[in-house]
Amino acid sequence: SHSAFYPFKDDEKIILIKNINATRERYLAAGFDEVYLSIIPNKVSILSPNMGRYNQLIERVQSDPNLKLPVIDTYSDFKKNPSKYYLKSDSHWTCEGRDLWLKKVNKILVNQ
């Protein structure tokens, strides 16, 4: 795994998205109704994106038109209120961060 500041080139993104899409196809073929992508942002990409040259991996993957998976986006919410979703003492989520993600997942499951 790389940091939020590790250069992430477009050709690497293309390969990543192809692999994610292939994983989705395998699970759909195995009988799953759907497969979702939820990229959980690390603390530094939310609280300190200017600490270095942020690679914008999450935004680039989630918005790519070739991505075939529906996205459960927490990045946008976390960016709106950065200090609310991470513990001050380490990089783990607060209860609010975990609950936000869980509510988004449950909303999708209920609406199916």
Image (spheres, rainbow, N blue to C red):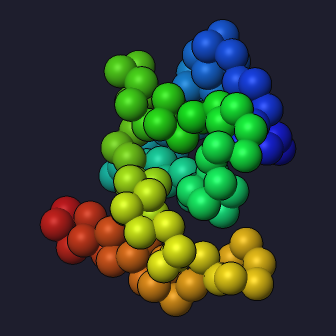
Of residues 22 and 65, which is closer to you in this image? 65
* Residue ranking furthest to the bottom: 95
Near-viewer residue (16 or 90): 90
Residue 26 screen position, x and y as percent: 54, 37
**How many labels were placed on the picture?**
0
Q: Quadrant of residue 10?
A: top right
Which quadrant is home to the C terminus? bottom left
Residue at far left of view: 111
Q: Write down the quadrant of residue 54 in the picture.
A: top right
In this view, the residue in front, 46 or 58, is 46
Residue 108 vertical placement versus 6 (above, below): below
Position of the N terminus, as image quadrant, is: top right
Side of 63 where 51 appears, left or right: right
Residue 80, given in percent of the width and then of the height, sits at: 37, 62
| Residue 4 point in image, percent of width and height | 71, 42
* Residue at point 39%, 76% (across, down): 100
**Residue at the location (68% across, 82% down)?**
88
Q: Is residue 22 visible?
A: no
Q: From this viewpoint, is residue 85 visible?
A: yes
- Where residue 58 appears, as percent x and y from the top left, is 54, 40
Q: Is residue 47 above or below residue 87?
A: above
Residue at the image point whose x is 73% and y is 72% from the top: 91
Location of residue 57 with respect to 43 vertically, above or below: above
